[in-house]
Amino acid sequence: MADGKTAKVPLAAYERELLRLQTELVKLQEWVRTEGARVVVVFEGRDAAGKGGTIKRVAEHLNPRVARIVALPKPTERERTQWYFQRYVEHLPAAGEIVLFDRSWYNRAGVEHVMGFCTKEEHQLFLRQCPIFERMLVEAGVLLRKYWFSVSDAEQQKRFRRRLKDPTRRWKLSAMDLESITRWEAYSRAKDEMLVHTDIVEAPWFVVESDDKRRARLNMIAHLLSTVPYREVPPPVLELPERPPSTGYVRPPRDLQTFVPDHAAGL
Protein backbone atom coordinates (compact mmCIF):
# COMPACT_ATOMS: atom_id res chain seq x y z
CA MET A 1 0.00 0.00 0.00
CA ALA A 2 1.06 3.58 -0.48
CA ASP A 3 3.08 5.15 2.30
CA GLY A 4 0.74 7.48 4.17
CA LYS A 5 3.67 9.75 5.04
CA THR A 6 4.51 10.41 1.41
CA ALA A 7 3.27 13.82 0.32
CA LYS A 8 0.93 13.88 -2.64
CA VAL A 9 2.35 15.08 -5.92
CA PRO A 10 1.59 18.82 -6.32
CA LEU A 11 -0.94 19.55 -9.05
CA ALA A 12 1.35 21.83 -11.08
CA ALA A 13 4.20 19.30 -11.05
CA TYR A 14 1.76 16.51 -11.89
CA GLU A 15 0.27 18.31 -14.89
CA ARG A 16 3.70 19.30 -16.21
CA GLU A 17 5.13 15.79 -15.97
CA LEU A 18 1.93 14.16 -17.25
CA LEU A 19 2.07 16.26 -20.40
CA ARG A 20 5.72 15.32 -20.93
CA LEU A 21 4.93 11.62 -20.50
CA GLN A 22 1.90 11.84 -22.78
CA THR A 23 4.12 13.43 -25.43
CA GLU A 24 6.40 10.41 -25.11
CA LEU A 25 3.38 8.12 -25.43
CA VAL A 26 2.61 9.75 -28.77
CA LYS A 27 6.19 9.01 -29.85
CA LEU A 28 5.71 5.42 -28.68
CA GLN A 29 2.49 5.20 -30.68
CA GLU A 30 4.20 6.37 -33.87
CA TRP A 31 7.01 3.85 -33.33
CA VAL A 32 4.46 1.07 -32.83
CA ARG A 33 2.62 2.09 -35.99
CA THR A 34 5.78 2.44 -38.09
CA GLU A 35 7.48 -0.73 -36.86
CA GLY A 36 4.33 -2.85 -36.88
CA ALA A 37 4.78 -3.67 -33.20
CA ARG A 38 1.98 -5.15 -31.10
CA VAL A 39 1.54 -3.90 -27.54
CA VAL A 40 -0.83 -5.21 -24.87
CA VAL A 41 -1.15 -3.44 -21.52
CA VAL A 42 -3.21 -5.16 -18.81
CA PHE A 43 -4.69 -3.01 -16.03
CA GLU A 44 -5.86 -4.95 -12.98
CA GLY A 45 -6.54 -4.19 -9.33
CA ARG A 46 -9.30 -3.77 -6.81
CA ASP A 47 -12.40 -1.71 -7.47
CA ALA A 48 -11.66 2.05 -7.26
CA ALA A 49 -7.90 1.40 -7.41
CA GLY A 50 -7.42 3.99 -10.16
CA LYS A 51 -7.22 1.82 -13.26
CA GLY A 52 -9.80 3.72 -15.28
CA GLY A 53 -8.32 7.14 -14.60
CA THR A 54 -4.86 5.95 -15.56
CA ILE A 55 -6.11 4.36 -18.78
CA LYS A 56 -7.84 7.63 -19.63
CA ARG A 57 -4.57 9.55 -19.25
CA VAL A 58 -2.63 6.99 -21.25
CA ALA A 59 -5.08 7.12 -24.18
CA GLU A 60 -5.94 10.83 -23.96
CA HIS A 61 -3.72 12.04 -26.81
CA LEU A 62 -3.36 8.79 -28.74
CA ASN A 63 -4.96 7.92 -32.04
CA PRO A 64 -7.97 5.66 -31.30
CA ARG A 65 -7.27 3.83 -34.54
CA VAL A 66 -3.91 2.79 -33.10
CA ALA A 67 -4.59 2.57 -29.35
CA ARG A 68 -7.80 0.80 -28.32
CA ILE A 69 -9.33 0.42 -24.87
CA VAL A 70 -10.94 -2.97 -24.30
CA ALA A 71 -13.39 -3.24 -21.39
CA LEU A 72 -15.51 -6.31 -21.95
CA PRO A 73 -18.93 -6.83 -20.36
CA LYS A 74 -19.87 -10.07 -18.66
CA PRO A 75 -19.71 -13.02 -21.08
CA THR A 76 -22.74 -14.05 -23.10
CA GLU A 77 -24.23 -17.50 -22.80
CA ARG A 78 -22.37 -18.51 -25.97
CA GLU A 79 -19.07 -17.13 -24.68
CA ARG A 80 -19.48 -19.11 -21.48
CA THR A 81 -19.20 -22.30 -23.56
CA GLN A 82 -15.99 -21.19 -25.32
CA TRP A 83 -12.40 -21.74 -24.26
CA TYR A 84 -11.97 -19.14 -21.54
CA PHE A 85 -9.29 -17.08 -23.32
CA GLN A 86 -11.15 -17.11 -26.64
CA ARG A 87 -13.16 -13.90 -26.13
CA TYR A 88 -9.97 -12.02 -25.29
CA VAL A 89 -7.94 -13.36 -28.21
CA GLU A 90 -10.15 -11.61 -30.76
CA HIS A 91 -9.29 -8.26 -29.16
CA LEU A 92 -5.50 -8.71 -29.31
CA PRO A 93 -3.62 -6.20 -31.47
CA ALA A 94 -2.61 -6.60 -35.07
CA ALA A 95 0.63 -5.05 -36.33
CA GLY A 96 0.89 -1.38 -35.44
CA GLU A 97 -1.69 -1.46 -32.65
CA ILE A 98 -1.81 -0.92 -28.89
CA VAL A 99 -4.53 -2.53 -26.76
CA LEU A 100 -5.26 -1.36 -23.23
CA PHE A 101 -7.24 -3.95 -21.28
CA ASP A 102 -9.41 -2.38 -18.58
CA ARG A 103 -9.59 -5.67 -16.72
CA SER A 104 -8.72 -8.75 -18.70
CA TRP A 105 -8.59 -12.53 -18.61
CA TYR A 106 -7.59 -12.10 -14.96
CA ASN A 107 -11.27 -11.71 -14.10
CA ARG A 108 -11.21 -15.46 -13.53
CA ALA A 109 -8.47 -15.14 -10.92
CA GLY A 110 -10.31 -12.36 -9.11
CA VAL A 111 -14.00 -11.58 -9.17
CA GLU A 112 -15.12 -14.84 -10.80
CA HIS A 113 -13.20 -16.90 -8.27
CA VAL A 114 -14.15 -14.87 -5.19
CA MET A 115 -17.81 -14.43 -6.13
CA GLY A 116 -18.29 -18.05 -7.17
CA PHE A 117 -18.93 -17.29 -10.86
CA CYS A 118 -16.58 -20.11 -11.86
CA THR A 119 -15.92 -23.51 -10.37
CA LYS A 120 -12.80 -24.39 -8.40
CA GLU A 121 -11.74 -26.59 -11.29
CA GLU A 122 -12.12 -23.73 -13.78
CA HIS A 123 -10.10 -21.46 -11.50
CA GLN A 124 -7.28 -23.99 -11.17
CA LEU A 125 -7.31 -24.61 -14.91
CA PHE A 126 -6.94 -20.88 -15.48
CA LEU A 127 -3.93 -20.68 -13.17
CA ARG A 128 -2.27 -23.50 -15.10
CA GLN A 129 -3.10 -22.22 -18.57
CA CYS A 130 -2.56 -18.49 -18.08
CA PRO A 131 1.27 -18.62 -17.97
CA ILE A 132 1.25 -20.82 -21.07
CA PHE A 133 -1.12 -18.43 -22.86
CA GLU A 134 1.01 -15.41 -22.00
CA ARG A 135 4.25 -17.13 -23.00
CA MET A 136 2.64 -17.84 -26.38
CA LEU A 137 1.84 -14.14 -26.78
CA VAL A 138 5.37 -13.08 -25.89
CA GLU A 139 6.96 -15.74 -28.11
CA ALA A 140 4.79 -14.45 -30.97
CA GLY A 141 6.31 -11.00 -30.51
CA VAL A 142 3.59 -9.29 -28.49
CA LEU A 143 4.92 -6.73 -25.98
CA LEU A 144 2.86 -7.67 -22.92
CA ARG A 145 2.86 -5.45 -19.81
CA LYS A 146 0.79 -6.23 -16.70
CA TYR A 147 0.05 -3.69 -13.96
CA TRP A 148 -1.65 -4.34 -10.62
CA PHE A 149 -3.03 -1.20 -8.96
CA SER A 150 -2.78 -1.55 -5.20
CA VAL A 151 -5.09 0.57 -3.02
CA SER A 152 -5.55 0.50 0.75
CA ASP A 153 -8.90 -0.40 2.28
CA ALA A 154 -9.23 3.07 3.82
CA GLU A 155 -8.61 4.84 0.51
CA GLN A 156 -10.98 2.52 -1.31
CA GLN A 157 -13.72 3.38 1.17
CA LYS A 158 -13.13 7.11 0.61
CA ARG A 159 -13.43 6.68 -3.14
CA PHE A 160 -16.60 4.63 -2.82
CA ARG A 161 -18.16 7.37 -0.66
CA ARG A 162 -17.22 10.04 -3.19
CA ARG A 163 -18.79 7.99 -5.96
CA LEU A 164 -22.01 7.65 -3.98
CA LYS A 165 -22.27 11.44 -3.64
CA ASP A 166 -21.10 12.44 -7.13
CA PRO A 167 -23.86 12.04 -9.77
CA THR A 168 -21.28 12.11 -12.58
CA ARG A 169 -19.42 9.12 -11.11
CA ARG A 170 -22.29 7.22 -9.49
CA TRP A 171 -22.33 4.82 -12.45
CA LYS A 172 -18.86 3.62 -11.45
CA LEU A 173 -20.28 2.07 -8.28
CA SER A 174 -22.17 -1.21 -8.47
CA ALA A 175 -23.55 -3.69 -5.99
CA MET A 176 -20.61 -5.91 -6.92
CA ASP A 177 -18.20 -3.14 -5.89
CA LEU A 178 -19.87 -2.83 -2.49
CA GLU A 179 -19.75 -6.60 -2.08
CA SER A 180 -15.97 -6.40 -2.44
CA ILE A 181 -15.81 -4.47 0.85
CA THR A 182 -17.05 -7.46 2.81
CA ARG A 183 -14.75 -9.82 0.89
CA TRP A 184 -11.54 -7.79 1.24
CA GLU A 185 -9.48 -10.67 2.61
CA ALA A 186 -10.87 -13.13 0.07
CA TYR A 187 -9.78 -10.82 -2.72
CA SER A 188 -6.37 -10.45 -1.06
CA ARG A 189 -5.88 -14.21 -0.96
CA ALA A 190 -7.05 -14.54 -4.56
CA LYS A 191 -4.58 -11.86 -5.67
CA ASP A 192 -1.71 -13.52 -3.79
CA GLU A 193 -2.47 -16.89 -5.39
CA MET A 194 -2.75 -15.26 -8.82
CA LEU A 195 0.66 -13.64 -8.47
CA VAL A 196 2.28 -16.91 -7.40
CA HIS A 197 1.15 -18.63 -10.59
CA THR A 198 1.26 -15.82 -13.16
CA ASP A 199 4.20 -13.59 -12.18
CA ILE A 200 6.45 -15.18 -14.77
CA VAL A 201 9.78 -14.06 -16.19
CA GLU A 202 8.36 -13.62 -19.68
CA ALA A 203 5.43 -11.49 -18.44
CA PRO A 204 6.00 -10.23 -14.89
CA TRP A 205 3.54 -8.28 -12.79
CA PHE A 206 4.33 -4.68 -11.87
CA VAL A 207 2.58 -3.31 -8.79
CA VAL A 208 1.48 0.34 -8.80
CA GLU A 209 0.88 1.94 -5.41
CA SER A 210 -2.28 3.91 -6.09
CA ASP A 211 -3.48 5.66 -2.93
CA ASP A 212 -2.15 8.85 -4.57
CA LYS A 213 -3.76 8.83 -8.02
CA ARG A 214 -1.41 11.42 -9.47
CA ARG A 215 1.67 9.52 -8.35
CA ALA A 216 0.23 6.23 -9.61
CA ARG A 217 -0.48 7.61 -13.07
CA LEU A 218 2.95 9.16 -13.47
CA ASN A 219 4.73 6.08 -12.14
CA MET A 220 2.82 3.66 -14.33
CA ILE A 221 3.24 5.64 -17.57
CA ALA A 222 6.92 6.32 -16.90
CA HIS A 223 7.52 2.62 -16.25
CA LEU A 224 5.67 1.54 -19.39
CA LEU A 225 7.75 3.90 -21.50
CA SER A 226 10.95 2.62 -19.90
CA THR A 227 10.17 -0.99 -20.85
CA VAL A 228 9.57 -0.46 -24.57
CA PRO A 229 12.57 0.16 -26.86
CA TYR A 230 10.81 2.82 -28.90
CA ARG A 231 12.48 5.70 -30.71
CA GLU A 232 11.18 8.97 -32.07
CA VAL A 233 9.95 8.60 -35.63
CA PRO A 234 10.36 11.82 -37.66
CA PRO A 235 6.91 13.04 -38.68
CA PRO A 236 6.16 13.63 -42.37
CA VAL A 237 6.79 17.15 -43.59
CA LEU A 238 3.43 18.84 -44.10
CA GLU A 239 2.68 22.29 -45.43
CA LEU A 240 -0.66 24.07 -45.49
CA PRO A 241 -1.68 24.70 -49.11
CA GLU A 242 -2.84 28.11 -50.26
CA ARG A 243 -6.60 28.42 -50.30
CA PRO A 244 -7.72 28.66 -53.94
CA PRO A 245 -9.68 31.70 -55.10
CA SER A 246 -13.45 31.59 -54.93
CA THR A 247 -15.33 30.12 -57.88
CA GLY A 248 -18.57 31.86 -56.94
CA TYR A 249 -19.93 29.55 -54.20
CA VAL A 250 -22.68 31.17 -52.11
CA ARG A 251 -23.75 29.64 -48.81
CA PRO A 252 -27.50 28.91 -48.55
CA PRO A 253 -29.50 31.21 -46.24
CA ARG A 254 -28.98 30.37 -42.57
CA ASP A 255 -32.72 30.19 -41.91
CA LEU A 256 -32.88 27.06 -44.06
CA GLN A 257 -30.80 25.18 -41.48
CA THR A 258 -31.61 24.14 -37.93
CA PHE A 259 -29.03 25.25 -35.37
CA VAL A 260 -28.72 24.07 -31.79
CA PRO A 261 -30.01 26.64 -29.27
CA ASP A 262 -27.39 28.96 -27.77
CA HIS A 263 -27.41 27.46 -24.29
CA ALA A 264 -24.11 29.20 -23.48
CA ALA A 265 -25.70 32.63 -23.93
CA GLY A 266 -27.65 32.20 -20.72
CA LEU A 267 -24.64 31.45 -18.54
Image (cartoon, rainbow, N blue to C red):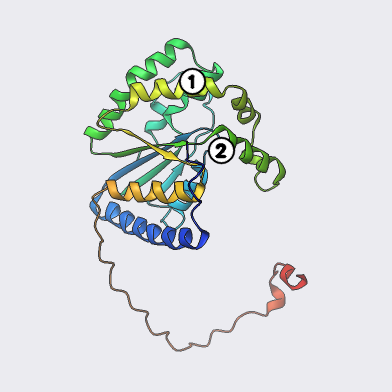
Tell me the SS state at disc 2. loop
Residue 23 image offset from top left, x and y in percent: 37, 61
Residue 17 position (above or below residue 114): below
> Marks 1 and 2: which is nearer the front?
2
Which badge, 1 or 2, comes first in the chain's sequence? 2
**Residue at the image position 25 percent from the left and 32 percent from the top:** 202
Residue 20 image offset from top left, x and y in percent: 38, 61
Residue closest to the eye, 250 or 205: 205
Residue closest to the eye, 121 or 148: 148
Instruction: Say left or right for 222 vs 171.
Output: left
Quarter occupied by residue 127:
top left
Mark 1 in CB contact with mark 2 (< 8 angstroms): no
**Residue at the image position 56 percent from the left and 19 percent from the top:** 115
Instruction: Say left or right for 152 vs 127.
Output: right
Residue 91 image offset from top left, x and y in percent: 40, 37
Q: Amino acid at mark 2?
A: Ala
Residue 263 position (above or below residue 1): below
**Residue at the image position 52 percent from the left and 24 percent from the top:** 111
Residue 234 position (above or below residue 118): below
Residue closest to the eye, 4 or 196: 4
- Looking at the image, which residue sits at the far right? 266
Q: Which residue is mark 1?
A: 80
- Looking at the image, which residue sits at the far top? 121
Quarter occupied by residue 238:
bottom left
Q: Amino acid at mark 1?
A: Arg
Quarter occupied by residue 135:
top left
CA gap, disc 1 and disc 2: 27 Å
Tell me the SS state at disc 1. helix
The circle on residue 48 is 2
